[in-house]
Amino acid sequence: MDIGVAYASPNKQVWLHVSLPEGSTAQDAITKSGIVLLFPEIDLASHKIGIYGKLAKLDAVLSDGDRVEIYRPITADPATVPRRDKQDIGSDP
């Protein structure tokens, strides 16, 4: 199976491809990709993961072509961040 593994830090985004046997899990893909070596801040005990934007567990069995995504923790509470009107987007502050 061909699997993608994606992660984005504030400064860099990567999408790595790995080949795995049928029955492999998200954990297998993450481990084989070596992404944790590229981004040592990834802590799979606290970072959530997903498959194509849907939350998943590390033991989720993958299908050919899946994309495993590692999500960073939210750093701002959406309830406390002021909303910008559509007309404000793209305008100078």
Image (tube, rainbow, N blue to C red):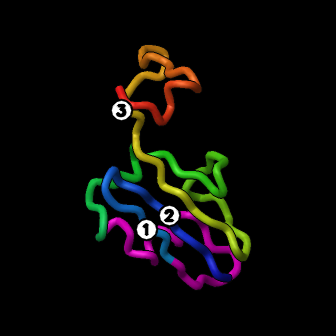
Q: Is disc 2 in contact with disc 1, using a CB cutoff of under 8 Å?
A: yes
* Residue that sits furthest to the front in the current view: 92
Mark 3 or mark 2, earlier in chain: 2
Q: Which residue type carries mark 3? A: Thr
82 to 57, vertically: above or below: above
Instruction: Based on the picture, tell me whether residue 1 belongs to the magenta stretch.
Output: no
Q: Where is residue 24 in the image (x, y as percent from the top left)?
A: 62, 73
Query: Considering the numbered disc 2 on the image, is that residue within a helix, a strand or a loop?
Result: strand
**Residue type for callout 1:** Val
Q: Where is residue 51 in the image (x, y as percent from the top left)?
A: 64, 57
- Cα–Cα gap, marks 2 and 1: 6 Å
Find the distance from the CA under tag 3 to the CA under tag 1: 20 Å
- Left or right, 39 with respect to 91, comes to left
Tell me the residue that label 3 is attached to: 75
Give the answer, above or below, for where 86 lies relative to 16.
above
- Going by the numbered disc 2, the residue's amino acid type is Ala
Tell me the magenta residue range. 17-37
Q: Residue at point 67% right, 82% down?
A: 1
Residue at the (34%, 55%) spot, across then down:
42
State the residue position of label 2.
Answer: 6
User: Residue at point 50% right, 64% down?
Assistant: 6
> Which mark is on residue 14?
1
Horizontal relation, residue 9 to residue 15: left or right: left
Q: Which of marks 2 and 1 is nearer the N terminus?
A: 2
Please tell me whether mark 3 sits on a helix, a strand or a loop: loop
Label 2: how many residues lie within 10 Å, few (<14), some (14-19) or many (20+)? many
Front one among 93 and 11: 93
